Amino acid sequence: MPAVNIPQSMITEHVNWHTKPGKPNQGGRAIPQGQPGSGAEFLNWHNGFISRYKQWRKQNGETAINAWPKIPAKLNPIPPNVNPPNFMAFNTLDSFGIFLEGGIHVILHNRAASVYNEPVLASFESPRSSYFWKLHGLIDKWRKDWASAH
């Protein structure tokens, strides 16, 4: 397993964010998945999580984990209903995030867990794998591309 060095506090933060929806005072996301506002929350929270981890790695002399530049061929084909030809067609960051979180994001986690024999990717402790950071780096790239286009 391409395990990464990561503070337990960041694993706990990720687990809480996903398992305590509607309970931000307990570390959970504020808006349950699929509800208005949840897509922007998903993209923005993970962007911040990635940034904090990159900073932690830098401060601890760890090398960067690069994002996938595109979906790896091993993980294709992605069903067309979750992989539209034009992500930029979404009018709001929220609608884009809702689409990603409930579709291609989940598929990529599960497919990578299977293809790369990384069961942890199918759990909320997935940040223990370098593939999490590659996958979420790609999703964050899509977020940035979307923001630049709008």
Image (tube, helix red, strand yellow):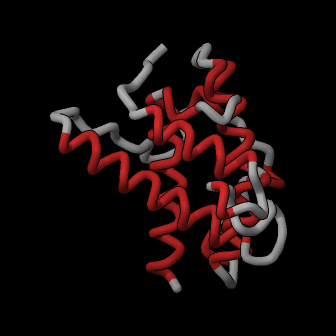
Q: In the drawing, does residue 147 fall left or right of residue 108?
A: left
Residue 41 image position (x, y, % from top left): 63, 69
Q: In the drawing, does residue 139 fall left or right of residue 50?
A: right
Q: Residue at x 72, y 31 (%)?
A: 110
Q: Is residue 32 visible?
A: yes
The quarter of the displayed image where residue 65 is located: top left
In depth, the one of 30 and 115 nearer the eye is 30
Q: In the drawing, does residue 42 fall left or right of residue 102?
A: left
The quarter of the displayed image where residue 24 is located: bottom right
Residue 134 image position (x, y, % from top left): 46, 39
Callout count: 0
Residue 133 image position (x, y, % from top left): 46, 40
Q: Residue at x 47, y 41 (%)?
A: 10
Q: Where is 98 relative to 10, above or below?
A: below
The quarter of the displayed image where residue 59 is located: top left
As drawn, the residue found furthest toward the front would be 25
Q: Where is 46 relative to 71, above or below?
A: below
Q: Residue at x 45, y 69 (%)?
A: 144
Q: Residue at x 58, y 18 (%)?
A: 116
Q: In the drawing, does residue 108 fall left or right of residue 150?
A: right
Q: Where is 131 relative to 145, above or below?
A: above
Q: Is residue 85 visible?
A: no
Residue 51 image position (x, y, % from top left): 37, 56
